Image (cartoon, rainbow, N blue to C red):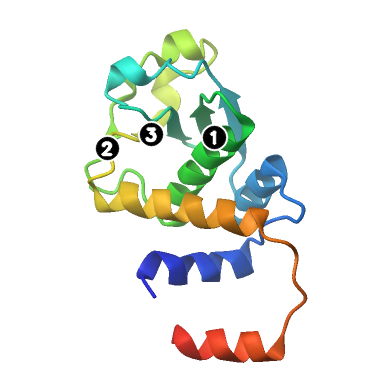
Amino acid sequence: MNDVAARFMEFNQLVPIPYPWDTREYVARVAEHRGRPITLCPIDPGALSGSGCGTGSGAWIARENDDVIMYGAETDWHADHIIAHELGHMLLGHGNDGGGSTQDATDLPLDKLMPSLSLSAIQSVLRRRDYSTDRERDAETFADLVMVEATLPKRTPSRLRSTFFRGRHR
């Protein structure tokens, strides 16, 4: 089992995925776990495409006391996936840690997308640039796992399943 899948299982214990799926509830749970408010900011799906975002249309903006997730999508499912991707970055500890994916806020059209957002309050911006970096692949895998888990029918705990999987990822 790869590291992201194992970490996802740990986070799913700490921050359970709501059943039935509710994006805002999951965001609220992640915010509570991290002790920082998270604001969702829908944007035009192509708003970030000209700023090095590639096909991705999401950005995580870390401010001093809170976080903002900007996302643009044509469908609810895609919006949920983009949000889960950015939450994956947060939970996996990505951000302004020298990993190379963060950028200066002045490189993005944030003042046009969110005029009320003070650029001086932004500590880092993490966007989907490409999927060749380990952090982007990890966040994408995390989002995929969230979305799969969110669509599975609710199962009652099984001692056999619990015992089997507990022994496999140790």
Q: Which residue is more in the foreground, 116 or 11?
A: 11
| Mark 1 or mark 2, whichever is nearer to me | 1
- Cα separation, mark 1 vs mark 2, equals 17 Å
What's the amino acid at mark 2? Asp
Q: Residue at x 74, y 80 (%)?
A: 157
Residue 126 on image: x %, y %: 36, 36
Left or right for 164, reference 26: left
Q: Earlier in the sequence, mark 1 or mark 3?
A: 1
Q: Residue at x 36, y 71 (%)?
A: 2
- Cα separation, mark 1 vs mark 3, equals 27 Å
Q: Secondary structure at mark 2?
A: loop
Q: Earlier in the sequence, mark 1 or mark 2?
A: 1
The quadrant the N terminus occupies is: bottom left
96 lies above or below 46: below
| Mark 1 or mark 3, whichever is nearer to me | 1
| Mark 2 or mark 3, whichever is nearer to me | 2
Q: Residue at x 60, y 37 (%)?
A: 77
In this rendering, does residue 65 appear at all? no
Q: Earlier in the sequence, mark 2 or mark 3?
A: 3
Residue 11's disc is none
Residue 130's disc is 2
Residue 78's disc is 1
Left or right for 99, reference 59: left
8 lies above or below 170: above
Residue annotated with mark 3: 123
> Label 3 near label 2: C-beta < 8 Å?
no
Residue 109 on image: x %, y %: 38, 13
The quadrant the C terminus occupies is: bottom left
Q: Secondary structure at mark 1?
A: helix
